[in-house]
Image: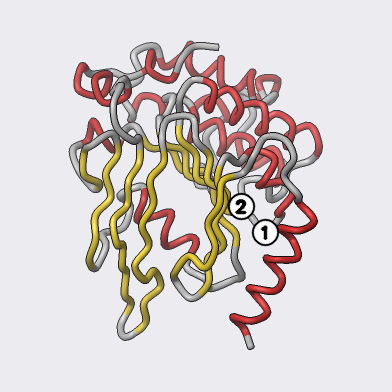
Amino acid sequence: MQSPHETASTGVASALANAASGPALTADALVRAFGGRRAVNGVSLTLHEGACLALFGPNGAGKSTLLRLLGGLLKPTTGTTRLHGQPLPGEAETRRLVGLISHHAMLYPALSVRENVRFAAECQGVIDADDATTRVLTQLRVLDRADTAVRFLSRGLQQRVSIARALVHGPQLVLLDEPYTGLDETGAQALTEALGALKANGATLVLVTHNLSEGLALATHSAIMQHGTFVDEQPVSPSGFDVAAYQAKYRALVHEGLA
């Protein structure tokens, strides 16, 4: 698979993506307030290349807001986020290193599968948009629907196209908000393989999911979020990690937080 670095369109983006020293993603005391409510309240984290943070928590814990802050899609009330040392939101070259996968399709229904993904590639400055489009559609196992208008696809196939759209430019930071929603077994396996390849090529992932087993299978780190802050953080060992014990801890923390 082509490295995500190879699709970057500018020297600045390549330099950022290939930064050899220091963490890939840092957040320092992030706060985001909506009126008098702090959806994110003092979150800090540090992730290196190839890391995957699995982020768990009940509805309303602030997980989706945190993803938007980490990707520079939302400005914090206070605090900072940096990707390879560059502030987010920041220059366009830095923002192009970010990919967002949501459970919302974010596609143009009247356009074909190929047109949707190629348009995203062109907007991100990918040098060979056609080649990158074909590669990622093959990876997500939806190339056979490339010339079909998105509006005619099932919900699960639309989700695969949305994922392809988010990954076509080889992002170095991939933010995932319930990405497995609507996927069948084939689509879920294709997504897991794509994320594994991104990690192997040095991309940093932050995955929000309610499925603990699913998230922990990809994770190098985990965090449980409650009322806008992390109430538990720990590394995830590739072997010997007690998923059942972690699930019990999660239930206890969430139940205590909701009491």
**Left or right side of 146 for 11:** left
Q: Nearer the viewer, residue 42 or 74?
A: 42
**Picture disc at residue 32:** none
**Picture disc at residue 210:** 1
Question: Do the CB atoms of the residues marked 2 and 1 lie less than 8 Å apart?
Answer: yes
Q: Which residue is mark 2?
A: 178
Q: Residue at x 59, y 34 (%)?
A: 161
**In this view, the mark in front (2 or 1):** 1
Residue 179 appearing in the image = yes
Q: Residue at x 47, y 44 (%)?
A: 175
Where residue 236 appears, x then y in whole percent? 62, 44
Describe the colour scheme in one phrase: secondary structure
Where residue 58 appears, x then y in whole percent? 61, 70
Where residue 196 appears, x then y in whole percent? 61, 27
Q: Nearer the viewer, residue 98 or 205?
A: 205
As helix, strand or loop, the secondary structure at mark 2 comes to loop
- Please report whichever mark, 2 or 1, sits nearer to the chain's N-terminal start: 2
Q: Between marks 2 and 1, how big is the CA–CA gap?
A: 7 Å
Q: Quadrant of residue 16?
A: top left
Above or below, comparing residue 256 to residue 183 in the picture: below
Which quarter of the image is occupied by the C terminus?
bottom right
**Left or right side of 180 for 234:** left
The amino acid marked with disc number 2 is: Glu
**Left or right side of 248 for 83:** left
**What residue occupies the far bottom of the structure in this picture?**
259
The amino acid marked with disc number 1 is: His
Crowd rating for badge 1 (residues with CA inside 10 Å; few <14, some 14–19, many 20+): some
